Amino acid sequence: MNPTMLDSGMVRRKKEKKKRPAWGIPKGIVLLATPEGWRTSVLTESGMLCGRLDVPINTDPQDARSAAAVMVTELARDFHDTDVEVSWEPPQEPWSWTAQVTLAAENDSPSPDAEG
């Protein structure tokens, strides 16, 4: 009987502590309406992340902007442990929107998780 990888056991990677990704905190968003669907480019401190926005093609532009803003705020929170605010600029074209992403202002009140 020939041993297989499963029979002989596979080497598993050690669980590593979640590291911050190589790309930085989001700084801006470009949202495009295309015939294939909504596309995003997220400008970060160290590059650009591009992809498809996970909303239906016929989504209203306001709803697409909201979905893109949620995506970026969750990205910043999940990967960089920071809160950001998204400010959409007036559109230059009817199929293209841009937004500035800035660090959220600090709250004076402690978070519900804070112990005092």
Image (cartoon, helix red, strand yellow):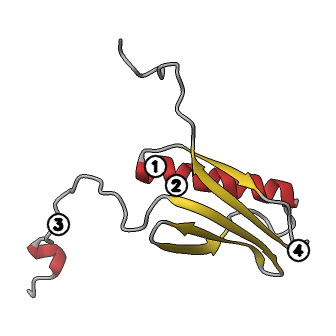
Judge from the rendering whether residue 36 lies leftward or rightward of residue 71; answer left or right: right
Judge from the rendering whether residue 3 lies leftward or rightward of residue 101; answer left or right: left
Mark 4 nearby-residue class (10 Å; few <14, some 14–19, many ≥20): few
Image quadrant for the C terminus? top left
- Residue under numbered circle 2: 75
Cβ–Cβ below 8 Å for labels 3 and 1? no
Q: Nearer the viewer, mark 3 or mark 4?
A: 4
**Label placed on residue 115:** none
- Residue under numbered circle 1: 78
Q: Secondary structure at mark 2?
A: helix
Name which residue type carries label 4. Glu
Mark 2 nearby-residue class (10 Å; few <14, some 14–19, many ≥20): some
**Label placed on residue 12:** 3
- 74 vs 91: above or below: above
Whole-percent x, y for residue 73 in the image: 58, 49
Q: Nearer the viewer, mark 3 or mark 1?
A: 1
Whole-percent x, y for residue 67 in the image: 71, 54
Sequence order check, earlier mark of 4 and 2: 2
Residue at x-position 36% and y-position 15%: 115
- What's the CA distance linking mark 2 and mark 1? 5 Å
Q: Secondary structure at mark 1?
A: helix
Front residue of 72/4: it is 72
Q: Nearer the viewer, mark 4 or mark 2?
A: 4
- 94 vs 27: above or below: below
- What's the CA distance linking mark 2 and mark 3? 27 Å
Cβ–Cβ below 8 Å for labels 2 and 1? yes
- What's the CA distance linking mark 3 and mark 1? 25 Å
Name which residue type carries label 2. Leu
- What's the CA distance linking mark 1 and mark 4? 32 Å
**Label placed on residue 93:** 4
